[in-house]
Amino acid sequence: MNQLERPKDERIQEESECHHDNSDGTNNNNRRKTVCPAVGEHPLQYNYTFWYSRRTPSRPASSQSYEQNIRQIGTVASVEQFWRFYSHLIRPGDLSGHSDFHLFKEGIKPMWEDESNRSGGKWIIRLRKGLASRFWENIILAMLGEQFMVGEEICGAVVSIRFQEDILSIWNRTSNDQMTTSRIRDTLRRVLNLPTNTIMEYKTHNDSLRDNSSFRNTKISL
């Protein structure tokens, strides 16, 4: 069985918590807690956190209002935890309005300004309506299964539901590393089985901060 295939045994197991000492040597009361795989589960290479956001398009977005609008909805540390959590989430194609699902490595906020994101950017794929759920599942399984083969470069993925189209994006840490960004693009084409003439777009987070836009003024790649 592929590591990320849905486990046959879907029985709910009690999730455990790990306790990690902070690097500053503070006492036990300040230890950070993080989700860990339960006994017998298959650990992911990284923990991942699901986020959800929704806003009214007519209202101008700002960094502060965006941060207030994103909601953390759960963290997973194993294949089994992922499938239990994911199976209870609404599918992106069933969302309405101006909504986004985000899946990012634990500790990274889905914000341009986050320390892990600010020197990076994202690949963007625009989808006609009706494809978002299947493509979202394919892209996050590829990410959790470490199919991109770019070390720690991948930060997370986003599916954005809009009125006329839906948009997938995958965020990486280093926008000026051409070899890495090209490998991510080529892996996206493969795991999503995209036609060779599919238009791919890339945008740095610095450019997004300058024009306060996620998807305008992108660089086109064929």
Image (cartoon, rainbow, N blue to C red):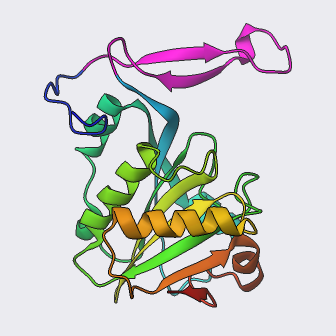
User: In the rendered image, is residue 60 in sight?
Assistant: yes
Quick check: is 101 in the magenta stretch? no
Furthest-left residue in view?
8
| Residue 68: x %, y % from top left | 61, 59
Total of numbered circles in the picture?
Answer: 0
Q: Nearer the viewer, residue 149 or 25?
A: 149
Residue 12 percent coordinates (x, y): 22, 22
Is 40 placed above or below 168 here?
Answer: above
Left or right placement of residue 85 versus residue 183 in this view: left
Residue 32 drawn at (x, y percent): 66, 22
- Identify the magenta region: 13-41
Q: Is residue 155 above or below residue 45?
A: below
Quarter of the image that includes the N terminus: top left
- x, y (%) of residue 9? 15, 24
| 57 up-or-down from 187: above or below | below
219 relative position to 77: left or right: right
**Left or right of 101, for residue 211:** right
* Residue farthest along the right direction in this orientation: 24
Query: Which residue is painted at 50% across and 33% down in the image?
Result: 45
Point 34% across, 89% down: residue: 164
Q: Quadrant of residue 30?
A: top right
Reply yes or no: does residue 18 show up in magenta.
yes
User: Toward the viewer: 138 or 88?
Assistant: 138
Q: Give the side of residue 197 with respect to residue 6, left or right.
A: right
Q: Residue at x 17, y 22 (%)?
A: 11
* Closer to us: 148 or 12: 148
Is residue 100 visible in the rendered image? The answer is no
